Amino acid sequence: MIERRFHRELYPPAAVDGALKVFERFATFELADEGDYRVVRISAKRPERELKVARELGNYALGLTRQGGLS
């Protein structure tokens, strides 16, 4: 399991949620709110898949954030 932390000041919750929807077919996610962070725990059948999904999830959430209009 890999964990990614998204700070609320940088990543609107809608951006994280949008990214999770896109990648839900590739892995299983656990979402938790911990202070100023939305924490996503990523599980997949293979560790290399977890790593790839974690990286792409972060990139996609950043892209959604950059598009603006999310808050």
Image (cartoon, helix red, strand yellow):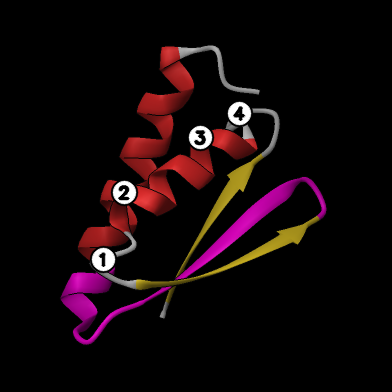
- Look at discs 3 and 4 and give the one toward the viewer: 3
Q: From the viewer's perspective, is 36 left or right of 16? A: right
Q: In the image, is residue 71 above or below residue 41?
A: above
Q: Which amino acid does label 4 sit on?
A: Leu
The disc at residue 10 is 4
Q: Name the residue under label 1.
A: 25
Residue located 63% across and 39% down the image: 13
> Split into 4 quadrants, where in the image is the N terminus?
bottom left
Residue 5 percent across, percent down from the top left: 57, 54
Q: Do the residues labelled 1 and 4 touch (CB within 8 Å)?
A: no
> Split into 4 quadrants, where in the image is the C terminus?
top right
Q: In the image, is residue 6 above or below residue 49?
A: above
Boundaries of the magenta span: 35-50
Question: Residue farthest to the top?
Answer: 68
**Helix, strand or loop at mark 4:** loop
Measured Cα–Cα span from mark 4 to mark 2: 20 Å
Q: From the viewer's perspective, is 58 left or right of 71? A: left
Residue 32 found in image quarter: bottom right
The disc at residue 22 is 2
Q: Name the residue under label 3.
A: 15
**Helix, strand or loop at mark 2:** helix
Residue 47 included in the magenta stretch of the image: yes
Measured Cα–Cα span from mark 1 to mark 2: 8 Å
Question: Which residue is more in the foreground, 56 or 17?
Answer: 17
Question: Residue farthest to the bottom?
Answer: 45
Q: From the viewer's perspective, is 10 left or right of 42? A: right
Q: From the viewer's perspective, is 70 left or right of 53? A: right
The disc at residue 69 is none
Measured Cα–Cα span from mark 2 to mark 3: 11 Å
